[in-house]
Image (cartoon, rainbow, N blue to C red):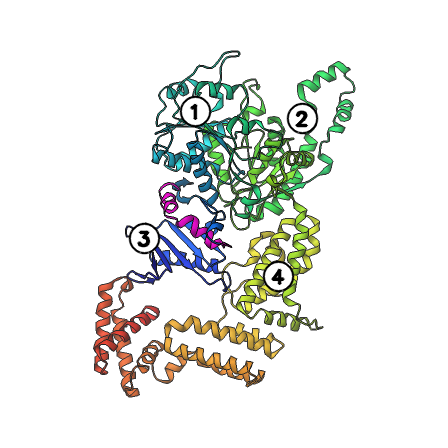
Amino acid sequence: MINQFSIKNKEFKIIPDIVIFINGIPLATIECKSPNINYPTDQAISQLIGYKQKNEQFFYPNQLLITLARYQAKFSTTYSPAKFFFDWKVPYPKEIEKIVEKPTKQDILLYSIFRKENLLDLIQNYIVFEEEDNKLLKKLARYNQYIASNKIIKRIKTEQGGVVWHTQGSGKSLTMTFTAQKIRRIQKIKDTKIENPCILIVTDRTDLDDQISTTFKNCNFPNPIQIGSIRQLNEELKNPTGKTLFTTIQKFGTEKGQIHPVLTESENILVFVDEGHRTSYGNLALNMRTAIPNAKFIAFTGTPIDKKDKSTPRVFGKYIDKYLPRQSIDDRATVEIKYQPRLERVHIKSSELDVLFDEEFSDYTEEEREDIKKKYGKYRYIAEADDRIKDICKDLLNHYRTTVQPEGFKAQIVTISRDAAVKYKKFLDELGAPRSEVIISKNPTDKPDSDLRKHYKTKAEQRALIKEFRKEMNGEDDLCFLIVCDMLLTGFDAPVEQVMYLDKPLREHNLMQAVARVNRTYKENKTHGLIIDYCGVSKKLKEALEIFNDGDVEGFLQPLLADVAKAEQAKNKVKAFFERVPKTYDSEKYVDECIEILSQKDTRIRFEQALKEFIIYVGNIMPNPQANQFKKDMHFYGKIYQIMRNTYDLTGTSVVDVSEKVKQLINKHLESQGIEVLHEPMDLYSDKFDKLIKRKKSNKAKASIMEHKIRTTINNLMPTNPVYYTSLRQRLEKIIKDHKQKILGELKLLDELDNLKEDLDAEAIAKKRNMQKEEFAVYKLLKTRTDNAEDKLTKASKEIYSKLEKLAVIDWKDKRNHQKIMEKEIKRKLYKLDFEIEEANKLANEIMDLARSIL
């Protein structure tokens, strides 16, 4: 470990706080920040990303990036964007309290990652390069994946199985991949007979089988074999050692009444059963255990095992690890799911079904009606009614266009039947909806001229549509809706999907798995997933959640309008910034004083964060009419925010952009009031700046804006003439200090700032000396080091700059040999001014640094 390790390339020098070396190779870089500054983690992440941009070569072997700020700590792999820096919340492998009395997040992360065994383990076994959408992504296990994987291997050592429950969307497939990868690499599991085992991954759905096997393949797992038939499965299991096999449990099927043969008695088989709660009990599960009687079974599930269900733990063993919905949301591994019932008149209530059905078929005998019910089903008959689906499509389309599409998200429509799916497609097209596609299963009994057959798609066509649906929104031809019946309700992962329009009465685990399609993280503005209920499943949702322990499902599903209370709280947080500002009849003066409150950078940062939170909650509620109660406040604080940005020349993404709906609402209001919403940073000497100052009512507001603008200008110009602008900065600090100590009144303060403003124009100052501003910058550097006469220094400055200008060929900053020539010419001039060799070397370096800024 090296503290303040300095790394220099041709152009830049970087000094990370801590670099961890193993055998001379830099494998981890740590940036430390004081916990007392604003947003220390964000600053540390920005600095690490900046280091990579300046010296990419140093980071080629680097595996881990860490940020530390005592009470905060985050980790990521190299080349991850800022949103993929995560906490390490659970110490492993022991309780850290035995070492540290009150451990902070920093203590837990350092303990868990930098134990010698853990660090080597993470680097060797828990980093993969996964191909996604033609991009190669470097992925590092999150703490829950790392801990679960090691617990699995520990459990196997006891020659027992168990259950891993990690909530939907939190990376179960990667946990399987990491675990299988480590088992492959260690070959023999210590203290067991398991050596180079067969790893068999079993699912109960073809799409799940495809998804998990694709994850393994995309991570370059060696020789994964996806089983295509019963015969192939039987052949592979005759000699299973060292193989990694993927199969559906249906391939353990037999003829009715037939006992499955034993395929192998090897004890060297590890079975990972996905969605273990579904595949634990039936005849197929019996056949599987008969075929491989000595295998070790580990069940993975994305939904909790219910209170009454003792079968899954009994079949597989005790829980190995749990990762609950609330944990996943808090860790930003998934987003919260919100629920909203819509169009109450189209909800189908079971108590009304018989009445509606009997009315519709009143001309039929009782026996005929019963036959019809058996054939078509009560619910399905009502759910497929054209008028009902048309009503839903109108509402759905309005909701999508006003709430979902502006934010750049897509949606899934889940229907009662394949026939209903086709009708949804038809009515959406008639209403001019964005592009939709139907993905349904085939049935040989469908008539040749059936509308259903028109929507048949090959496996390759389905994969192509799914790939297209997963893409970021880009234009008018985007695939915005996938309409399904049974397919893509499990094992389907599309982060761009925010909304599921649900028109199918699902229950319990099936319902929980379906709604979890919308909980994947995406861009910053995806703050939640949303279930829009058109079939009245609220009771079923309540029942589904009630069968599980309360702690297990905490935070899994929230009513959308719960955000109303949160928005109210967030509004009050924003309002609190301006409590000290006295209300006046002069609204412009009131706004000026609000802007004065935001003159300090840390206050602006806190205000932005509070406003962002308010915008998110209001955006969640819109377009529900309950959002109207916040409209006035949105307009006012949006106005304050935009004037703040204009006044203090803030760059970067506006927090208003978090929600496109809210952005449009605020910007439209601002434009109607004649406020500039967007602008380039204002020049200190521009008409815009003068007009901004004149509009201010109070001298205090004018001085605040001028101070900020002068300070910003000095910081921006500092590299072009370090000596000159350092002196101006010191002058500014003295002016502000004198004002605070009541030495300068407000009018005198404005005069002093105005004088300082005039002196900021280095070009004008240089002209008075008959120099270019670049020559003047060289002059100021020389002036600090020698007492030579003015005319002699002026002449030397001009000669040095002229020589450098002639030598500044294309890409000279990347050519070290050429830079040496430039340095040599500078030194020749300095020696003529009687500089000693050591002093000339230092000054030549400073002049070269200046040249990099001005040439």
Of marks 3 and 4, which one's residue comes earlier in the chain? 3
Q: How far apart are the alpha carbons under marks 4 and 1?
A: 63 Å
Residue type, label 2 = Arg
Q: Which residue is mark 2?
A: 380
Circles 4 and 2 in contact, beta carbons < 8 Å:
no
Sequence-wise first label, 4 or 2: 2
| Residue 105 within the magenta-colored segment of the rendering | yes
Foreground: disc 4 or disc 1: 1
Badge 3 element: strand
Give whichever of discs 1 and 2 has the lower sequence position: 1
Q: Which residues are magenta?
A: 101-126
Q: Is residue 226 left or right of residue 339?
A: left
Q: Amino acid at mark 1?
A: Ala
Q: Is residue 820 above or below residue 245?
A: below
Residue 224 appears at what percent x and percent y? 38, 30
Q: Earlier in the sequence, mark 1 or mark 3?
A: 3
Vertical position of residue 681 compared to residue 260: above or below: below
The C terminus: image quadrant: bottom left
Where is residue 511 shown, x and y percent of the image? 61, 33
Task: For mark 2, give the secondary structure.
Answer: helix
Residue holding disc 1: 295
Is residue 645 visible in the rendered image? The answer is no
The answer to whether mark 1 and mark 2 are in CB contact below 8 A is no
**Does any portion of residue 738 appear in the rendered image?**
yes
